[in-house]
Each structure stands twice: as C-alpha cells, then as structure tokens.
Image (cartoon, rainbow, N blue to C red):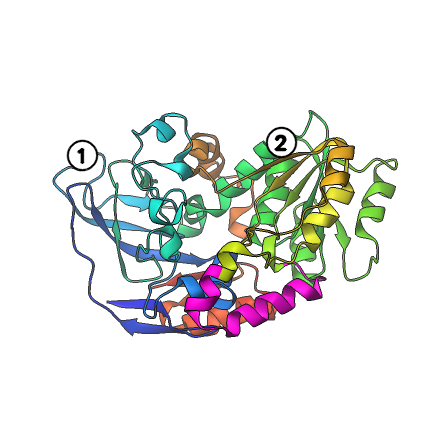
Amino acid sequence: MKAVTWHGKRDVRVEDVPDPVIKEPNDAIIRVTSSGICGSDLHLYEVLGPFMAEGDILGHEPMGIVEEVGSGISTIKPGDRVVIPFNIACGHCHMCGMELYAQCETTQVREHGMGAALFGYTKLYGHVPGGQAEYLRVPEAQFGPIKVPEGPPDERFVYLSDVLPTSWQAVEYAHIPEGGSVAVFGLGPIGQMSARIARHLGHRVIGVDGVTARLEMARRHGIEVVDASEVSDVPGEIRQRTDGRGTDSVIDAVGMEAHGSPAAKLAQTITGLLPDVVAAPLMSNAGVDRLAALNQAIDSVRRGGVISITGVYGGMTDPMPMLRMFDKGITLRMGQANVRKWISALMPLLTDDTDPLGVMDFTTHRMPLRQAPEAYEMFQKKADGAIKILLTP
C-alpha cells in the first residue's frame, strides 16, 4: 500500500509499504477514505525527529471503511463506516473507567513514562503506524472505532478523530462561567473549533492570531478577533475589551509553535541539528518550548480565571512564571483529549443538517495522498490560506 513516511526534518515521502494485517483478536483493518494533517504532525516535521525512526508512517486523524476484524471483535463489522480516535484505548481498564481514555492503562507506553499509545506519533507514544495511508491496523478495535452514518461526506465526521473532541475538551477544561468570556490563542484547526464550540455554548469569544486567512475564517463564524500582527500588546488589548480585567478563561491552542521567543527557537534549532542519541535526552530533560503564547495567556486571563492548554508542549524544564500565576490565582487544566468521552455531545451537532459548528466550512484543502509532501510544506508555511488539509488515498 501507499503511505506517508518520515525520513527526517521536513522530509516526508509517499512510499510503498507492507499492507497491515490482523495481529491480535481485538484488531481491525480499515480502508482509509480521508486522513487529516494535524498541527501536531508539524512537530514531527520540525522538532521531534529524535523520537522518530526513518520510515515511520504518519497520521492520527483517519476515517474509513472496515475491511476485516479480528476474532474478538463484535462491535463493528466489515463494511461499517468508522472514525478512528487518535489515542488507542481499551475501554475497560481503571483509567478508561474514569473516562480518562488518553491515560489508558492497557496501552500506556510505560517504557517512556507516557500515557496511552497514539497512532503515527513517535516511539514515546508506542511507535504505532499511522493513518496517512491506504489501510490502517486498529488495535483495541472493540472500543476505539466510532461508527458514523452513511451518506454525508467525510468532512462531516472525520474531525471526530481529533479536532472536535480536542476542541470540546479545551472548552470544558476552560470552565467558562455562564455568559462568560474566553480568549482563544491560535486560530489554527483546534483554535478555530474551540472558538466555534465556545460561541455555540453561549460564551463571548475573542480569537487571537496574526494570519489573515485564520482571522477571516473566525470572523465568518461570528468570532471577535485580535490581529496579533497589528496589536503590539495583545493582553492589554484583551483587558481593554473586558473592563480591564481580562477574560474569564483562556484557551492556549498554540503550544510550542509560538513565535516571539528567540532563545527557545534557538534551542529547538540547535537540538534539531544534534545526533538523535544526543538530542532525545536533551529534549526529554530541557526547556525547548517557545512560551510566548502561554505567557500571554497568563497576562490575559482575569484574576481567579482558568487557562486550558491544548497546544502541545515538549520540554521538561520550561520556565513558568509561578509568582504571577500564584498571585493571580490562576487554574491550569491540560492534557491529551479523552476522545470517546465527548462523542455523545458532538454527534448530534454533526448529524444536524444545519451544521451548527460549521464543519463544512473547515477543510481548506483536500489533496491526494501522493501530494502529501507538498501538503506538509504548504501547511507548515501557512501558504495558500491552508488551515486544514485532508489527504485522500
């Protein structure tokens, strides 16, 4: 089969690889019909190479048709249309019983002290082949796959794999009071959907970004925006719009990608040039993140407010402004999305033909799998208005 494979920094290729096969009774094989490129994939493209192996299959946002199931599977059958959550959970362990599916004890990657295994995302998360491919082996398929109706296009449901539950959890974790306000830093895919969900739930939303296409998309969906390319003091602007207090909550949907921290950018660049045997322990034990967005979030939230972090950070000793956080009485909530926890809330919104979350105005580019290298470059450069790219095998 054809699959998108990693070969080094900014080097992804579409290659022939062996077809996946059933290995365990709880496995399934799906024929992929759509697979998204995630902002987290850009971390593999740019920064996290020390935790990759040449030829790793990328991608963790797939959906498709069930082709084959193992002997232990009774919940899905060949021919079913399914979305595959990005994290792999068993559904029956202690953590899954608490709906903390991102911490599943069956698939936890204990060797590296990490949570549940993820598709297509480094040896830290299990080295599981990903879904930017023609076919995908799905472990723990007795629980993971989400059956969706026939008929509507993939764009209606594919974002249940990651974007929608991650965004819903970001809003839930933000603990916005009734009729309250939230600032969303970063209007990439997660920020866009977090902003739409918060607005759908009745909150005032202020989105922050400096990319014109992202700001325009947010405006189309009724989001108040701050153009960070034109405003020198973003937290000051947010406070000015909120009676000097700041918003009740902030969602950091940026993470380690934030601009504005030259020292951390230099650390990322130097680390990327080191041999993997040196770079991996350095990244595991050092501060390598650009914390500009998080620092602005801390300055923008009101006293006693909540910051929900959904952007990915990768450093172990990143400096945090603890005095300021303590003085303001800020609550932090963060983590990988517990995908299956939020499906019951999201599914009615996706089967509603009025499309309340605007999922049909989200995909900016649909490209064939063979053009994945061009798609990655486009997404990384934010070229041609690229906000969300789907690959079609």
| Quadrant holding the N terminus | bottom left
Amino acid carrying label 2: it is Leu
Q: Which residue matches tag 2?
A: 201
> Camera-side residue: 195 or 261?
261
Is 176 inside the magenta-drawn segment?
A: no
**Residue 269 appears in which quarter of the rendering?**
bottom right
Is 261 inside the magenta-drawn segment?
A: yes
Q: How many marks?
A: 2
Q: Which residue matches tag 1?
A: 74
**Are dots 2 and 1 in contact, CB under 8 Å?**
no
Determine crowd level at label 2: few under 14, some 14-19, many 20+ residues with C-alpha closer than 10 A.
few
The residue stretch that appears in magenta: 258-281
Give how far across and how far down residue 171 sits, in percent.
59, 36
Residue 109 visible, this orientation: no
Give how far across and how far down residue 322 sits, in percent.
71, 41
Give how far across and how far down residue 150 sits, in percent.
32, 43
Amino acid carrying label 1: it is Ser
| Quadrant holding the C terminus | bottom left
**Residue 188 appears in which quarter of the rendering?**
bottom right
> Camera-side residue: 112 or 307?
112
- Chief secondary structure of the magenta portion: helix
> Camera-side residue: 317 or 388?
317
